[in-house]
Amino acid sequence: MNGGYLTFASDGVGDMAQDVERPSKIRPFFLRAAILSTLVFGGLGWVGIVLLQERDFPSVLMGSPPGGSQIVPILPGLLYGGVFGVLAWLLVRQPFMMGVTRRYVALTAAVRGWPAIIAVSVFAGAGEEVLFRGALQYWDGLIGTAFLFVLVHGYFSLKEWRLSLYGLFLFLGMIPLGLAASHWGLIGPILAHAVIDVVLFSAFSAMRQTDTGRQLTVI
């Protein structure tokens, strides 16, 4: 990450050919880790909402959508997640971003096949949105929470401007989720978050298959 080029060794990404040939399934350890992280993030969010902020958790989760119908936040959440996920992929697949992108393609190698992609995306969307948009936004505000979300995920870097560019894009994309959470509850943001992850995980999986059999170069 200092301007030179690094290549993944054969015991890392070089084994992708074997990964692609294996049947699609959820690795038990990875699924347990995803569930555990969701329980931790969601649990911390619940503690913040219920015990520290003394708010009603179902009210925070369901919100007050127009007409009282949860269809109102569900449909925009799914649509926004799909559109933003595609835009994110269009950004990271640009030639100048390939070094950063291929690093994340390698890091997400354990998530392959639709069952794993959907499960991990839903768990991540639920746990992180309860913590960030549900609890932390109450204290840090809309902008502060969006910034903290991107910062915690490691997308702001003083050394790698391309990674920070994606972080800025993600920061701007999190603001509508915060607005939706504050007005319509967490259902829409959870679905949007999950769909974004599904789009990116599936795109990374497709890219991994394209790069099978050769080393991936990262900056």
Image (spheres, helix red, strand yellow):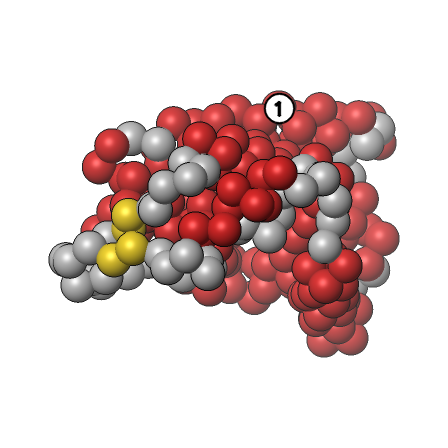
Viewer-nearest residue: 88 or 148: 88
Q: Which residue is located at x 14 percent, y 57 percent? A: 3
Q: Amino acid at mark 1?
A: Leu
Viewer-nearest residue: 126 or 141: 126
Q: Which residue is located at x 48 percent, y 26 percent? A: 86
Residue 56 lies, in percent from the top left, at 83, 60
- Residue 7 visible in the picture: yes
Pick out the residue farthest to the bottom.
Answer: 52
Residue 105 lies, in percent from the top left, at 45, 45
Viewer-nearest residue: 7 or 56: 7
Where is mark 1, residue-wise?
79
- Residue 84 visible in the picture: no
Apparent side of residue 211 relative to residue 46 in the rendered image (left or right): left
Q: Secondary structure at mark 1?
A: helix
User: What crowding class fits label 1: few (fewer than 14 Cα within 10 Å), some (14-19), or many (20 or more)?
Assistant: some
Residue 52 lies, in percent from the top left, at 72, 75
Quadrant of the rendering where the N terminus is positioned: bottom left
Q: Which residue is located at x 44 percent, y 52 percent? A: 13
Question: Residue 187, located in which quarter of the rendered image?
Answer: top right
